[in-house]
Image (spheres, rainbow, N blue to C red):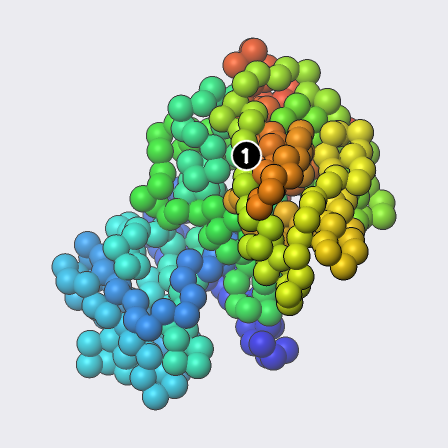
Amino acid sequence: MGLRKRAFFCVRRYLVFFIIGLICIFGNLISSVPIFAQIVAVQILDGASSVNVSSEEILKIADMKTGKVSALPTGNSYPALPASGGIKIREMSFSSMIRIMGGPKLIRINGRSYRGSVILSNDKGRIGAVNELGVEDYLLGVLPREVSPKWDREALKAQAVVSRTYILRNLGRFADKGYDLTSCDKSQVYGGADSEKPETTFAVFETKGQVLEYRGALASVYFHADSDGYTEDPKYVWGTDSTPEYLKGRREPVREKTPYSFWEYRISYEALAKILGGKGETVRKVECKKKNSSGRVVSFVVRTARGKMEIDSNKFRTILGAGHLKSTKIKRIINGRKDVAFEGGGWGHGVGLSQWGAKELADKGWNYKRILNFYFPGTNISQFRD
């Protein structure tokens, strides 16, 4: 993306809600919608051959290059197709980037509902979609995909504050691609309005605008599913030279059995050799060379017929797949005749807040402020201001 396009991306962040604010002033709705509310652009679709657009009300389509505004009738689902470097909906032709805007009703993209507006773009003959909406509205579709709505309210509130901080700290992370964050676990899992649940919505409302700060700036926060009793120091995950005190690994005060307290992953030596890129190589054994104070493996040693190779544990986990090797908290490696089995605990990189750990603390009566103070000691909760 060129400099002009990046500049356009930054300007439009505030322009959309400025326009909404003006509408609200003249519609006597100023009390319910902030004029300069912070918005976030979330990629919800990429590389599609077509996208179906629908709503329960008339939609406005604004061509972001020509300024042309058209209306899309209510009721039906209309395919948006790439056409001659642009986008075609019904018999209407547009340039390569359009914004679809609704009113009080939600916009549906491929049957899934979204708040705010949606930008469709034609990139080399494929359609991409970006959802632009306020941070608080975005959180409504994030929380129920990150934690269970059935958990104690204090655990949900802790996740809301951490997720909000993560969003604001990472605005513009993918600006060169035309959006802030993704809707998958590369950022935070986001399911749109269809994912919203009353319990998590209440947690967002109860903590509205609250973020974690450290020395007057937004804290660098991370979270994961389950630390298996001990959080991790970032230097062992990302090779960070300087780690903030509030992110250093620590033992959790409460440890109960979770769905991820024990797991096993088994892979054949032949398959492992292929994944590691060895042509004609024969894997004979896998060992953990060293563990750190959190009990996680620092590096693995793979022994082959030609020798051995040492691989960083997090790189090894990425190679095998984070869904297979759920963490580097390996408790035992069993080398068989034709395969190797990894027995471990926890899920995720282990840095920052453990979602299952927060649940356990909430179940023991901890409120969300105390939970956050444990996982991010030295930080403080403050009200975010644009």
Furthest residue toward top? 365
Q: Nearer the viewer, residue 285 or 174?
A: 285
Give percent across and percent down for residue 332. Answer: 66, 31
Residue type beneath disc 1:
Glu
User: What's the residue at 38%, 59% (across, down)?
Assistant: 117
For disc 1, the marked residue is 264
| Apparent side of residue 191 relative to residue 246 in the rendered image (left or right) | left
Q: Quadrant of residue 343?
A: top right
Q: Quadrant of residue 65?
A: bottom left
Give percent across and percent down for residue 274. Answer: 59, 60
Q: In the figure, 153 relative to 52: above or below?
A: above
User: What's the residue at 74%, 45% (across, down)?
Assistant: 300
Q: In the figure, 12 relative to 253: above or below?
A: below
Q: Is residue 172 visible?
A: no
User: What's the residue at 34%, 88% (across, down)?
Assistant: 84
Q: Is residue 80 visible?
A: yes
| Apparent side of residue 344 relative to residue 139 in the rendered image (left or right) | right
Q: Nearer the viewer, residue 271 or 338?
A: 338
Q: In the figure, 42 relative to 256: above or below?
A: below
Q: How many marks?
A: 1
Image quarter hosting the N terminus: bottom right
Give percent across and percent down for residue 209. Answer: 55, 37
| Apparent side of residue 285 relative to residue 117 in the rendered image (left or right) | right
Furthest residue toward right? 241
| Apparent side of residue 151 relative to residue 75 in the rendered image (left or right) | right
Q: In the figure, 168 relative to 1: above or below?
A: above
Furthest residue toward left? 75
User: What's the residue at 64%, 67% (across, down)?
Assistant: 279
Give percent across and percent down for residue 151. Answer: 45, 23
Q: Residues within 10 Å of mark 1 (few under 14, many from 20)?
A: some
Q: Quadrant of residue 295?
A: top right
